[in-house]
Image (cartoon, helix red, strand yellow):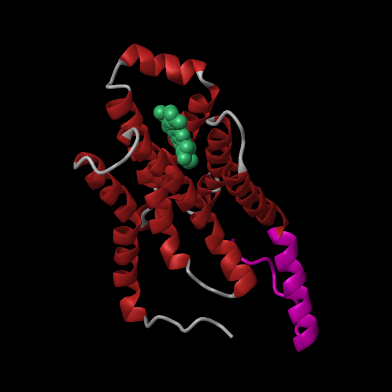
Amino acid sequence: MGLPALPRRYHPASIWLLYAVGLFPAAWTFYLGATGQLTGNPVKVFEHLLGEWALRFLILTLMISPLRDLAGINWLRYRRALGLLAFWYVVLHFSANMILDKRLAFDVIVEDITKRWFITIGMAALVMLIPLALTSNAWSIRRLGSRWTLLHRLIYPIAALGALHFCLSVKVIGPEQLVYAGLVILLIGWRLVRPRYMAWRRSRRSVNTGLAPAGPRPK
Ligand code: HEM
């Protein structure tokens, strides 16, 4: 049984709701930190929260397509918002590190980026996210055509770098890192086998209906 469909007229509102709910953890933790209600090191707590949500939103963005392929749930309309939320969380995570933690000490920042591998990897992911965020609009989709799809496949290496960055940021890899890294590996694995699965599904459908298999579907 499928999920009850949301009437079309509520789609735009549901996307704005997703942005609001998605930004809530950052806003709430910032408020708690600013009002002295965070225990431990508030800057670190804030920075960690932003990093974790960045990775969560990257994973949720990658889950939209398998959710449609495997469960028939079409939440494509939320993919752009999820991707942009991931981008803004990475930007906030980076800014918290640079401004609140390193207090814009340029030499420390440069040394961190060039000498600490996990930060170099995080920076690479952030840089790769920028063209995706800039082209996450209808105008770019029209202008770039099939190059847009190609460009946006960068989301897979970005998520892989994000998960690797997380694993390397800790001294001992624990269950949390393993769960995130495992999810990213599964989602990349799915992307690799997807064309074959879709071809198999189409051929099975055509056998069942007695129709000739259709040509390759747009991705
Ligand atoms: C796609 C990009 C990125 C993702 C998904 C990401 C995610 C994460 C996650 C999940 C953590 C661990 C948080 C925790 O301990 O709970 C982390 C830690 C960290 N990240 Fe990132 N990050 C990204 C990019 C960056 C960038 C660009 C920087 C540059 C400054 C950065 C700096 C750090 C630092 C310094 C830590 C360790 C904080 C500490 O334990 O002291 N990250 N990141």
Compared with residue 139, is residue 94 higher up or lower down, i.e. above or below? Answer: above
Specify whether residue 196 is painted magenta.
yes
Which residue is situated farthest in the front direction here? 39
Quadrant, the C terminus = bottom right
Which residue is situated farthest in the left direction here? 35
Q: Is residue 185 visible?
A: yes
Q: Main secondary structure of the magenta part?
A: helix
Expressed as whole percent of the image width and height from the top left, the position of residue 144 reads 45, 50
Expressed as whole percent of the image width and height from the top left, the position of residue 190 reads 67, 56
Which quarter of the picture shows residue 38? top left
Q: Nearer the viewer, residue 72 or 153?
A: 72
Which quarter of the picture shows residue 154? top right
Q: Is residue 144 left or right of residue 12?
A: right
Span shown in magenta: 194-219
The residue positioned 45% from the left and 82% from the top of the image is 5
**Image quarter where ligand 1 lies:** top left
